[in-house]
Image: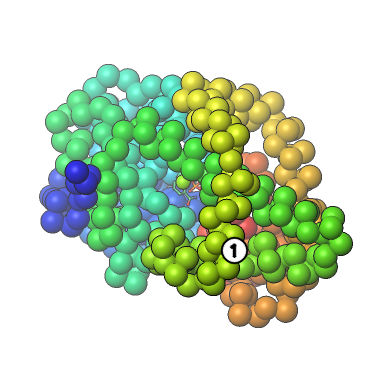
């Protein structure tokens, strides 16, 4: 049995007819949601803090910007497009006190609902549309006529319209052009955290670093080790993306394929499986969330220590030099993002917030793209 996918025809735009959608936050996801919905014919207002630097950007794009509390009062649907670690404070201070029955509060990731930081009062609908891609692509793919796939979930349907409105939102965002899958806040949050920790971010960067270190320690040239363990990874992953593991194995040599079968499972062995299960358990039982929340409450000392430790890893230093000669990699935004990442300016208050303070050549780079490139 395959899961049901929802496409344009499964989502009725009339569910949002006459309604106002407030997008709170105008960062990576926020700007994409606001602009895509606006261009899809939905009435959109943007909620931002009085001093927010993003006010001008949203206004230049033709959107109406108001304070968060005002946006909440005027809206029928409220999307929290804020960093997960800022959502609770903004919700408690400015959103919750202004909510009324019948409104739909939406999220782009389930963290704050799943771990109980935000508990919408009775009578409030709770939904999610979580795009499976970075914000700048949610925007640019929509502009090109396509869409980024998404997950949707309805946590509470007090009004009886939450599901239809959530699907209509996904359609206006462009997501139903690509396909939308129904999930729960629990499933979305737990799998998202597990995926980024085990494979996408954590597992992959640890694997790259360890393989690089192993080669360099054995006396091989670091430049060669960089090409072998980091650069070429993208080329291999592209094959997997296009046609799965089979297509990758079809494309590589038989020697590489044989080595894949005999050595891969020795490296990623049953010990790794045991650890993965433990990592998943700590996500499910809330240990990871508790630690991350405490880390934020304490000003992120451990996070900053870990970030600083990895920033100057040899694979990064060698890579920066080699990539500086690969002009084809370098649309302006990538260079800017790298410079931003190298300068460590993706700050705690919001990764996009301190671009301007970097001496990096970021002028002209859309801030969202800079930030995504820096991720
Ligand atoms: P961003 O970090 O890009 O959000 C930045 C926006 O939030 C800015 O407008 C910023 O204000 C505002 N903001 C930050 N801190 C505060 C605060 N304390 N008070 C008020 N406003 C604040 O967030 P993302 O777009 O990355 O994430 C939004 C949601 O989308 C999250 O739930 C995330 O998990 C989810 N998501 C993100 C993806 C991505 O591509 N990044 C992918 C899928 C889901 P200012 O403009 O003034 O700086
Ligand atoms: Mg994810």
Binning the other alpha carbons within 10 Å of mark 1 as few (below 14), some (14 to 19) or many (20 upward) gives few
Dividing the picture into quadrants, the one containing residue 62 is: bottom left
Residue depicted at 19% across the width and 38% down the height: 163
Quadrant location, the C terminus = bottom right
Residue depicted at 40% across the width and 28% down the height: 113
Q: In this image, 10 relative to 90: left or right?
A: left
How many numbered marks have been drawn onto this rendered protein structure?
1
Could you tell me residue 46's position as x and y percent?
40, 48
- Answer whether residue 245 is visible to the viewer in this image: yes
Residue where numbered disc 1 is placed: 233
Question: In what element is the residue under mark 1?
Answer: helix
Residue depicted at 67% across the width and 54% down the height: 208
Could you tell me residue 13's position as x and y percent?
16, 52
**Front-most of 94 and 82?**
82
Q: In this image, 302 relative to 169: left or right?
A: right
Quadrant location, the N terminus = top left
- Give the colour scheme of this rendering: rainbow
Could you tell me residue 165's position as x and y percent?
20, 42
Q: In this image, 363 relative to 258: left or right?
A: right
């Amino acid at each position: 049995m395959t899961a049901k996918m929802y496409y344009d025809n499964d989502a009725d735009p009339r569910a949002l007819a006459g309604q106002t959608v407030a997008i709170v936050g105008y960062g990576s996801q926020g700007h994409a949601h606001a602009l895509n919905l606006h261009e899809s014919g939905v009435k959109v207002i943007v909620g931002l803090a009085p001093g927010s630097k993003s006010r001008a950007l949203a206004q230049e794009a033709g959107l109406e910007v108001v304070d968060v509390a005002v946006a909440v009062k005027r809206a029928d649907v409220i999307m929290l497009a804020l960093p997960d670690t800022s959502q609770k404070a903004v919700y408690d201070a400015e959103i919750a006190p202004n909510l009324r029955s019948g409104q739909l509060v939406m999220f782009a990731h389930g963290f704050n609902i799943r771990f109980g930081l935000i508990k919408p009062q009775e009578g409030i609908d709770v939904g999610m549309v979580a795009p499976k891609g970075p914000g700048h692509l949610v925007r640019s793919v929509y502009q090109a006529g396509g869409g980024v796939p998404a997950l949707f979930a309805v946590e509470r349907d007090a009004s009886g319209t939450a599901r239809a409105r959530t699907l209509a939102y996904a359609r206006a965002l462009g997501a139903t052009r690509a396909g939308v899958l129904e999930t729960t806040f629990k499933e979305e949050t737990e799998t998202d955290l597990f995926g980024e920790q085990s494979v996408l971010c954590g597992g992959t960067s640890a694997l790259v670093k360890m393989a690089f270190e192993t080669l360099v320690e054995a006396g091989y040239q670091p430049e060669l080790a960089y090409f072998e363990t980091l650069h070429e990874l993208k080329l291999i992953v592209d094959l997997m993306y296009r046609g799965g593991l089979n297509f990758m194995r079809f494309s590589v040599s038989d020697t590489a394929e044989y080595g894949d079968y005999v050595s891969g499972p020795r490296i990623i062995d049953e010990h790794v499986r045991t650890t993965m299960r433990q990592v998943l358990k700590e996500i499910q039982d809330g240990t990871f969330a508790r630690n991350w929340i405490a880390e934020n409450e304490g000003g992120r000392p451990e996070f900053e220590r870990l970030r600083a430790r990895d920033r100057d890893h040899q694979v990064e230093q060698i890579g920066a030099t080699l990539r500086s000669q690969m002009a084809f990699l370098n649309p302006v935004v990538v260079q800017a993002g790298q410079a931003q990442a190298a300068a460590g300016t993706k700050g705690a208050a919001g990764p996009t917030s301190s671009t301007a303070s970097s001496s990096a050549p970021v002028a002209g780079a859309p801030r969202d793209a800079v930030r995504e490139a820096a991720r």
